[in-house]
Image (cartoon, rainbow, N blue to C red):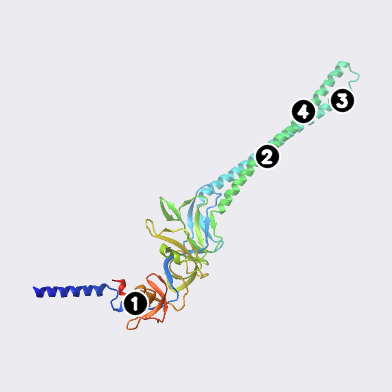
Amino acid sequence: MRYFRKYYKTMLLLMQVGIFFTCNPLKNDSSFLQVNTVVSDSLPMLHETGQLESIETFNINVPMRWNMEYRIVRLAPEGSFVQPGDTVVHFDMQPLQDRLSQAKKELQKVRQELKQVLEQNALALETQYKTIERLKMQYQIDSTRLANARYESKTTREQFALELEKTRLQLQRAFQNLEAQKIINAAKERLKRIKIEQARIKLDRILLMKDEMKLISDHAGIVIYPYYRSSGRKVKIKEGEVLFPGSTVIQVANLKRMKAVVTINEVDRSFIKEGQKVKITVVAYPDTVFSGEVVNIARVATEERKGSTVKVYPVDVYLDSGANYRLKPGLSVRAGIILDTLKNTFRVPNWCLFQKTNQTWIEPLGQKKIPVELIFRMDGFSYVRGALRDGMVLKSNRMIYE
């Protein structure tokens, strides 16, 4: 029984030692040699992920003057390159063609009505002029008859005088009727000409809309399909959709000016400021590193994802790449934001740093401790200065794990 207890204690001790060396990061194996290593690093970076966007994106919209819905029949392929003057959207012409035919018929109708009014006006004036000519002749006859009646009786002369006055009044009335007829004719003609102008304006608008049934890009760039809401969810625009005036149909992104939009955790927000340099790697092109600069940091934090308690700040990083057509909106990127440019600094794991009162040092394997100056800490590493060299393997601070 005593032998069994001694054996049991020995086995328990061996199990504890095995667990310690299996789980403890102090284990002296290849991973330990890689992790507990001094690295010469003068560019402390904060690494984040994001995606590319264009700094300049131009919207191609349905014209606001449209007063009906129009259906898309053809779109420029998403991701295709367009130049200024290229047609990027075609709408269904049939509804507009029906309106165009109707507008032409209306214009032809009011023009025919104007022709009829002008003919009627001319006939009415002709009638008035004939009446005036007839009355003028009658007035001359009555005047001559009255002049020749000086030897007639007084009663006869008075009768001739009354007839002459009657003719004069009729002639005066005829001139008044002529002026009134001219006014009436002018009003009728003006009304018809107004209707013609209205019909012509309507036709011109439809013809202008006909030209706009093909939307043209004014800028060079790559075609992007925007999202819109359908049944409570966001979907991309597609052929067959019916749009309202002012709706965005297509976006054209300028590839000469690109930016990376990355999100910064609220914990790291204090490290980021505008003007910091950034090294950017596009996941699709891992062999190329692009440079950039932090230009804008969101003032208000947003949720990392819906329902998450983690807050992040969107950050705009403008690329210095110029016209590089490999860079397209939507590509995933990894961005290393250079927090500072240091001199003669080394990066060591936090668990390899020893501190006591005002002293800070590290302990290389098989060597004496080396005093260091702590610059700052970030992401589990400390940036220090001291008599170190690249590749030193360090002891871990066991006090961290006790």
Q: Residues within 10 Å of mark 1 (few under 14, many from 20)?
A: many
For badge 3, the amino acid type reads: Thr
Q: Earlier in the sequence, mark 3 or mark 4?
A: 3
Residue at 86% across, 23% down: 145
Q: Earlier in the sequence, mark 3 or mark 2?
A: 3
Mark 3 or 4: in front is: 4
- The secondary element bearing badge 2 is classed as helix
Q: Which mark is residue 144?
A: 3
Mark 3 or 2: in front is: 2
Residue at 26% across, 72% down: 23
Callout count:
4
For badge 1, the amino acid type reads: Asn
For badge 2, the amino acid type reads: Arg
The residues tagged by marks 1 and 4 sit, at their Cα atoms, a distance apart of 121 Å
The residues tagged by marks 3 and 2 sit, at their Cα atoms, a distance apart of 44 Å
Q: Earlier in the sequence, mark 1 or mark 4?
A: 1
Q: Would residue 10 be found to the left or right of residue 360 on screen?
A: left
Question: Where is residue 158 shown, x and y percent of the image?
Answer: 85, 18
Residue at 62% across, 43% down: 198
Q: Earlier in the sequence, mark 2 or mark 1?
A: 1
Question: Where is residue 114 shown, x and y percent of the image?
Answer: 66, 40
Q: Residues within 10 Å of mark 3 (few under 14, many from 20)?
A: few
Q: Which mark is residue 173?
A: 4
Residue at numbered disc 1: 36
Q: Earlier in the sequence, mark 2 or mark 4?
A: 4
Residue at numbered disc 2: 190
Q: Which quarter shows the C terminus?
A: bottom left
- The secondary element bearing badge 1 is classed as loop
